[in-house]
Amino acid sequence: MRLRFLASQRRRAEQFTVLVRNVPQISVNSISDSLDQFFKTSHPDTYLCYQAVYNAYKFAKLVRKRDRLQNWLDYNQLKFERHSEKRPTKKTGFLGLWGKRVDSIDFYKQQIKEFDKNMALERQKVLKDTKSILPVAFVSFKSRWGAAVCAQTQQSKNPTLWLANWAPEPRDIYWQNLAIPFLSLTIRKLIISLSVFALVFFYMIPIAFVQSLANLEGLERVAPFLRPVIELKFIKSFLQGFLPGLALKISLYILPTVLMIMSKIEGDIALSILERRASAKYYYFMLVNVFLGSIVTGTAFEQLHSFLHQSPTQIPRTIGVSIPMKATFFITFIMVDGWAGIAGEILRLKPLVIFHLKNMFLLKTESDREQAMDPGSVDSPETLRITVIRKLIGHRDGKSSNI
């Protein structure tokens, strides 16, 4: 089935390309010469060509500045087309607050012309400087079979050199992680694993704190001035139903962003792999903190008085009676996460609101509007979260029914 799928697809560059990292510099040869010589020797029949990766950070910075200037030029030209009786002007000082007043269109055209010259010089400098070549390259082969052989075999006696993997799709590459050395990758993975382990258990503290406030008694104790409002029948029933689940969701709001940052530090080279790593970390958080943590902390807070005033032999019985009482909490949590999680992703309310705010205050040209209209991809960790917790609760309920 897999072979049939591949055969039915159009040929794509990544099917014939391997990403090679930790390329050593052999004797006096440059990295480019080392690459060409190595693959002509080890894969003489299938090797086609290579594309080195350059450290062009300064060039990329110039490109971004030039794009911003071009955007301002388009905006001023559009402004002049609408009001042709007066050419737009600007001050050359900081943020246009002071300085000599000049014609905006001529000013930005001159700036773009200077940037084009600087970009051409910087590009030639990067291409000619051998120190700009990073120890990583995309190596292409004449056939998929040749690429598969290279990607699935060790290329050198030293397992830390000539690391070959399938190249990601061009849009999927996370360029910042391409040139990370092998030893640094190992250290990063170890540090991130320890950090995730510590974060999973220390995150129990804010969740326990939120759980202590996620009931009317705790809320009245912290904010007694809200008691008259809370005692209203409609407000009281609403808070009893949605406050615990809403409080837990708020406490987990920044977690996907934190886990994605940790995954990027870990050193993977593809955005899809980064999302998969972040989702895996999120699963452990859901299992330990949301599922087990909410049961343990919720039971402890609700039965604390019983634990302190009964014999130790009765504690297991008390826990066994109180844990099923948390079913209401998980039902409300699934309901809250249902309309605020997957439903929110389907409706795309957040990107819609952000687009209209940008359209009111920031967007100047059609190019800006096209970029702002891109809603982006679905947030994988956030979307998978509700599915994971449903499976956990369903699995637990199924076990309980069998018992």
Image (cartoon, helix red, strand yellow):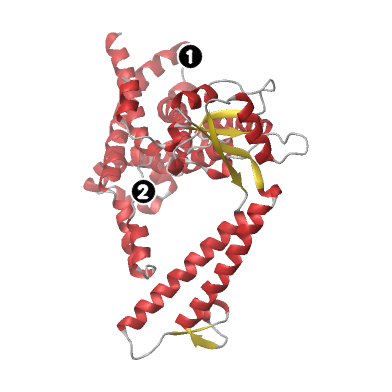
On the question of residue 214 being in view, the answer is no
Name the residue at 35% across, 80% down.
Answer: 79
Q: Which mark is residue 138?
A: none
Q: Is residue 122 left or right of residue 277?
A: right
- Which residue occupies the extreme right position in the image? 27
- The C terminus: image quadrant: top left
- Which residue occupies the extreme top position in the image? 403
Depth check, front residue: 294 or 181: 181
Whole-angstrom CA distance, mark 1 to mark 2, is 57 Å
Q: Amino acid at mark 1?
A: Ser
- Which residue occupies the extreme left position in the image? 234
**Residue 334 position within the rendered picture, expressed as x and y whole percent measured from the top left:** 30, 33
**Residue 361 position within the rendered picture, expressed as x and y whole percent measured from the top left:** 37, 69
On the question of residue 81 being in view, the answer is yes
Q: Amino acid at mark 2?
A: Gly
Q: Which mark is first along the chain, 2 or 1?
A: 1
| Label 1 with label 2: CB-CB less than 8 Å | no
**Residue 29 position within the rendered picture, expressed as x and y whole percent measured from the top left:** 73, 39
Depth check, front residue: 395 or 154: 154
Q: Secondary structure at mark 2?
A: loop
Residue carrying label 1: 311
- Crowding at mark 2 (Cα within 10 Å: few <14, some 14-19, many 20+): few
Name the residue at 44% across, 74% down.
Answer: 73
Q: Which mark is residue 376?
A: 2
Up the image or down, 215 lies above or below 56; here it is above
Q: Secondary structure at mark 1?
A: loop
